[in-house]
Image (tube, rainbow, N blue to C red):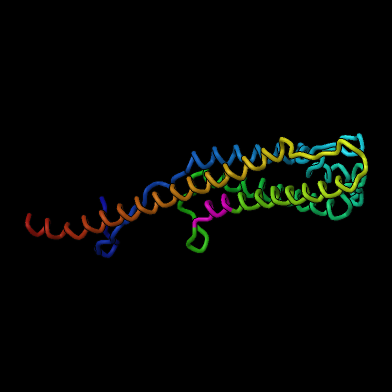
Amino acid sequence: MMAARSPEGERVLSLPLPPPEHCLAAAVLQGFAVMLMSMALSDPSWLQGQAGGHSFVYGPAYVLHLGRNLTGSGSDHLLHQSGTNILILMVTCCYISILLGLAAFLLDFVETRNKRVLGTNITPILHFTTALSTAGAVSLSSYLFTLILRELRLLKTKDNFVYFGDSYIFAICSGLISLIAAAVSLYCARRYRRRTYILITNVETEDASTPLLQGENT
């Protein structure tokens, strides 16, 4: 029945909504992106190279191992304080990406598609913000690459070089997958709104034609 009656005998229009939808595709994609970002955070090999005959590896994990001693300049004094500050910002971006990615994963996996904040579906926004935070970490790493490259050119020793490591690639892949997850989640949200609108329209049309049919039968 699409219509019910109140205790006073008046007909009350019932507008059932489709069941809350979860977007498993976006959830799987975001879960994979979070896994890649976690690997990038735990593995310090964002930037690798050699300076003065010594190998070096820099990444967010490098700052985590420093503990409270955040004044270290790294091997051959390549980082300086500015480089350490960049690594701290990279750690912040990585943690934000992981936390927001987990939140988006849960909202996509659990059946909460019809829950909104201020009339806006926040799940695609979380996906997109996660991608932006990951892009921030990648951009900071690229800037740190230029700083280290400039320091290497000042050294008088030979065979000095720097290159991007595996974690840098993991972070890029994580950001791209988060963008795809945002697009998929947005598509699911639009499809839910479209199905809801069609269902409500059909209910209103059927309810409006019910009195006419009852009058013909009498």
Q: How many marks?
A: 0
Q: Is residue 110 above or below residue 206?
A: above
Q: Quadrant of the C terminus?
A: bottom left
Residue 196, image x and y in percent? 35, 53
Based on the picture, tell me whether residue 21 belongs to the magenta stretch.
no
Taking the spot 21% from the left edge, 55% from the top edge, the residue there is 206
Q: As rendered, which of 133 and 79 lies closer to the eye?
A: 79
Q: Is residue 133 above or below residue 160?
A: below
Q: Main secondary structure of the magenta part?
A: helix
Residue 136 horizontal/vertical position (percent): 68, 52
Residue at 66% over, 37% down: 36
Residue 120 location, x and y as percent? 49, 60
Q: Nearer the viewer, residue 85 or 162?
A: 162
Query: Who's the residue at 88% across and 45% down the image?
Result: 66
Residue 23 horizontal side relative to residue 144, left or right: left
- Residue occupying image coordinates x 73% and y 48%: 142
Q: Position of residue 109 (x, y in %)?
A: 52, 42
Left or right relative to 94: residue 29: left
Judging depth in this view, the residue of 158 and 9 nearest the camera is 158
Identify the magenta region. Answer: 121-128
